[in-house]
């Protein structure tokens, strides 16, 4: 399943491009938190620009930032140009360490930290789900981004052909680690081998020698005992791989 990789990329982008916030919690959709063009305000603007974009991408709302250790923020010097921000590894709680520097104003550098978060819709189990069961009864709940693990799912169409890989309790956020692709064909199952050219369609019987999902390549034994490789079409048919 590729969704985990996708969401890990999203989190990496979030961690690697976001900067900082003001001396109090700020909602990024609101007006500027400082009346002057302070360095703190420049950093807040940069954070909010990226956080607003990510929130919109995930159909979320209420993006917010909260600087940690306010005394460090109070000591942040003025920067005549846009400050440079380098982000470090973010914790699961949303705490994001960063280094703010200004090469054009004394070449200073300060280490700060900020907490970022927003609300987003995720899929949640409406009832207990047994291992191997298809996930059919789901609902969408709004949760804080920092409260879910990477790999969370937001759309039911991403679960087509998947079943629960373990028991899932009602109210659990559906994560890619909780589901697995269901086998369309099982080892030992009779199948129809469909071979088609521009003018000829041939159908023969065979036995699947491996479990397989749709579009997987599996070994199939023909009626004459010969083993060939076939691509799974559906729960009853396979097609010989080209060249056999």
Image (cartoon, helix red, strand yellow):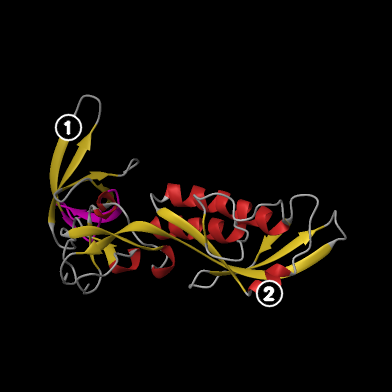
Specify the quadrant of the image occupied by residue 130. Answer: bottom left
Horizontal arrangement in the rendering, residue 90 relative to residue 221 (left or right): right
- First of labels 1, 2 by sequence position: 2
Q: Element type at marker 2?
A: helix
Viewer can see residue 1: no
Farthest right residue in view: 106
- At which x and y percent is residue 65? 53, 62
* Image mark for residue 201: 1
Separation (CA) of disc 1 from disc 2: 77 Å
Specify the quadrant of the image occupied by residue 128. Answer: bottom left
Farthest front residue in view: 35
Residue in the image at 74% along x and 65% along y? 76
Query: On the image, numbered disc 2 is attached to which residue?
Result: 71
- At which x and y percent is residue 152? 36, 62
Residue in the image at 26% along x and 44% along y? 240
- Quarter of the image where the C terminus is located: top left
- Quarter of the image where the N terminus is located: bottom left
In this view of the protein, which residue sits in the foreground, 75 or 183? 75
Residue in the image at 56% along x and 66% along y? 24
Say few, some or many: other residues with alpha carbon within 10 Å of mark 1 (under 14 / 14 to 19 / 20 or more): few
Residue 31 vs 64, above or below: the answer is: above
Residue 215 forms part of the magenta stretch: yes
In this view of the protein, which residue sits in the foreground, 44 or 145? 44
Residue 224 forms part of the magenta stretch: yes
- At which x and y percent is residue 150? 42, 65
Cβ atoms at labels 1 and 2 below 8 Å apart: no
Q: Element type at marker 1?
A: strand
Say few, some or many: other residues with alpha carbon within 10 Å of mark 2 (under 14 / 14 to 19 / 20 or more): few
- The stretch in magenta equals 207-225
Horizontal arrangement in the rendering, residue 105 relative to residue 120 (left or right): right
- At which x and y percent is residue 230? 27, 49
Horizontal arrangement in the rendering, residue 56 relative to residue 69 (left or right): left
């Amino acid at each position: 399943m590729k969704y985990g990789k996708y969401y890990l990329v999203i989190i990496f982008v979030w961690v690697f491009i976001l900067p900082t916030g003001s001396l109090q919690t700020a909602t990024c959709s609101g007006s500027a938190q400082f009346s002057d063009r302070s360095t703190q305000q420049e950093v807040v603007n940069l954070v909010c620009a990226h956080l607003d974009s990510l929130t919109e991408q995930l159909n979320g709302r209420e993006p917010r930032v909260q600087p940690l250790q306010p005394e460090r923020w109070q000591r942040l010097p003025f920067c005549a140009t846009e400050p440079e921000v380098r982000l470090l590894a973010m914790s699961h709680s949303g705490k994001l360490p960063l280094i703010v520097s200004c090469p054009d104003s004394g070449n200073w550098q300060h280490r700060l930290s900020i907490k970022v978060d927003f609300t987003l819709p995720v899929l949640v189990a409406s009832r207990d789900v047994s291992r191997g069961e298809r996930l059919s009864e789901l609902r969408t709940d709004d949760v804080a981004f920092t409260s879910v693990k990477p790999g969370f799912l937001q759309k039911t169409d991403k679960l087509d052909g998947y079943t629960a890989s373990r028991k899932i309790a009602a109210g659990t956020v559906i994560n890619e680690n909780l589901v697995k692709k269901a086998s369309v064909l099982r080892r030992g199952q009779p199948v129809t081998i469909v071979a088609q050219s521009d003018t000829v369609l041939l159908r023969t019987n065979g036995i699947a020698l491996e479990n397989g999902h749709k579009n997987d390549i599996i070994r199939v034994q023909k009626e004459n005992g010969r083993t060939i490789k076939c691509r799974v079409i559906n729960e009853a048919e396979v097609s010989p791989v080209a060249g056999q």
